[in-house]
Each structure stands twice: as C-alpha cells, then as structure tokens.
Image (cartoon, helix red, strand yellow):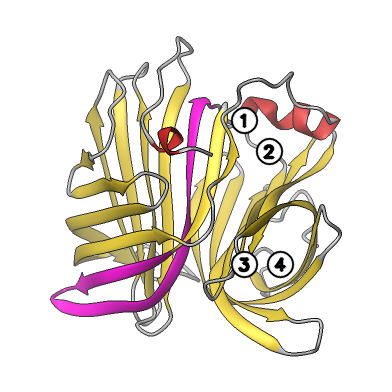
Amino acid sequence: MEPHHDLAHEVEDDDAWSESYYFNAYDPASDSGLFTRIGIRPNEGTMDVGLSVWLPGGDLAEYRHQIECHEMLGAPLEVGGVRYELLEAMQRWRLVADVTSSARRCHPSSSEHWPVAIRLDATFDGLSPAVGSDGRGTSGPGSKESKAAAATTGKGHFEQAGRWTGTLTVDGVTHEWSNARGNRDRSWGPRRWGGPPMWRWFSINIGDDLHFGGIRLGTDAGDLHRGWVSANGRVTSIAHWGIATELEEDQLTQRVIRLQAIDKAERTYDLTGRVLRVADIGRAGGTVINEGLTEWTWLHGDGATEVGYGIGEYLHQVDARGRPRIPVT
C-alpha cells in the first residue's frame, strides 16, 4: 500500500459508504491499553467515535460520541473529546483524548458503572508494512467463501502493526507507555454488517519483529480464512487459522486459545493465548461479541518461547438460552 491510501478516499453514491480508522494498544508494564475507532458515513450524515480503555487492574472504560457529518474529512479527525492526527502517512499517527468515560467490570459484566476521567496522548509508529488491497483492478472475490462474505466488507482495507509511546492518565494517575504495541486498520467503501454465523479475529504482536492479523469468518459457504503475518518485515498472507479453544463455565467465553497460523509459504506458527480479561462489547439481536485481551506465547521451532500481547475476539450467534448456535472449537 502507498502513502495516499492513508488519506481520505473519494465518497461513492452508495448509502452504506463508510471510511473507518481503527487502533488497538496494550502496555504490559502498566496493564493498560485501548481499542478505538472513528467511522465516517457521509451519505448517512454521521461521524462517530468509540474509545475503550483497558484500565490497570482489570476494568474497562468506554466513551462514545457522534456528530453530524455530510462530507468526507481527512485527518485530523475530531469527535467529541477524541482526536486522531496523521503525522506521517503509512508510518505515524497521534491519538489524543480528554474525556469523562463510563467504566465497568469486564467479565462477568454487571449493570454497575462509574465515571472515570481519561486523558490520552500516544503516538503509533509503524513496525510492519501496511498490507491490504484498495479494491481496484480486481475481477471480484474468487472463492465461494469470499463471495458469501463480500457484502459485509468495504472495497478497500489495510492493516499495520506498530509501537506506541506516550501517556495514559486515569483519574489523575499517569501511566507511561514504554513497551506498548498494537495494530491498526483502515477500511473504505460500502459496508453492511449482516450478522455472520461466527468469527474469530486476531491481532497479535510478539516483540517488534513478529506480528499477526486476521480472521476466521463463518459464512453459509464455509469458513473464510484471511490474514497476514509480518516476520522481520516480510509479509505473507495467512492460508489457514487452526483454532482450539478452552471456554469458561458459561461455554461462551474464551479462556485459552491454541492457535496454529499457516501462511501461504507453508510456514507454521504455533501460539497459545492466555486470555487476561474479556469485555462483552456487543449483545444485540442474538449476536454476542467478546473482546479478549490476550497474552500470546509463540513456540519457536527449537522449543524456545517468546511472549507478546494482543486480542482474540469471538463473535457468536446465540440461541434463546444464550448458547452459541455454532459450537465453539
């Protein structure tokens, strides 16, 4: 992907046209991090932000805001008390926030909420090339699984791993991010989420040199395996996500994730994810999304191990008893 892909894209006529900016981060030294997204839907007349902060000690703080917007805007993007600044295309972004958020326990969740003051000033520096597609010059999705999933994704999309530096201040207590990493993505084009049968989405950073991103998405035609691995700056597509999950007693919430990522060069990466905390971030119309902040251990071929952090996100469609319609494996 080229630097211009990090700028605003031309709006098309489709009512569902969207451009979104997403970032995640986790700093193990302070046990804090975030996942955040700004979405612009000019044909619907809105721009909104969601900022979710992993608080030290295990809770989650959330902030939401929406404003009126009828045209495509480029960075800086400002919604409520959150601002995204582009410092260098395809390399550096700065996120700033000064908000009063609503905090809650992660899992099990409850109806109890309390106010938390959040101040953020953090900079993302890319560690891997941005990998994706602008959706141009292709004849359309090839596999039956891709065709089945095509209606839910935008025309263009890319992802990138990076290092974070800066500070997060929670109720006046400042935490310096010295060892934080995370991934970001951009999507643009018509986007309609039609409620897939399931998905397992992963964002993983092992130090500065090994990064993963991708999804195993359930479709009516079978599971779609998509994603990438960046190893020492060399990016390869994922061919297959092998997943074995240990669940909590509710048989819905992920506790341990054993992941085998096989890339299209037939290299295999074995990872075990110990889920540190889970936030229920979506529960509507029979759909449940569990966001799992996860410690990932990569097993080298020589038997050595290396630890990193990231996300293991599980989407389920559930029945009237709250059980997943597709068994979790």
In this rendering, which labeled residue sits more in front, label 3 or label 2? 3
* Residue sitting at x 37%, y 44%: 89
The amino acid type found where label 4 is placed reads Gln
How many marks overall? Answer: 4
Q: Quadrant of residue 193?
A: top right
Q: CA distance from mark 4 to mark 1?
A: 27 Å
Which residue position holds label 2?
Answer: 196
Is 168 or 133 nearer to us in this picture? Answer: 133
Q: Are marks 4 and 1 in contact (CB under 8 Å)?
A: no
User: Dot 3, how many residues are within 10 Å of its Cα: few (below 14), some (14-19), or many (20+)?
Assistant: few
Q: Are marks 2 and 4 in contact (CB under 8 Å)?
A: no
Which residue position holds label 3?
Answer: 232
Q: Is residue 262 above or below residue 72?
A: below
Q: CA distance from mark 3 to mark 1?
A: 32 Å
Q: Callout 2: helix, strand or loop? A: loop
Considering only order in the chain, which callout, 2 or 1, is on the residue closer to the N terminus? Answer: 1
Q: Are marks 1 and 2 in contact (CB under 8 Å)?
A: yes
Which residue position holds label 1?
Answer: 152
Q: Quadrant of residue 4?
A: top left
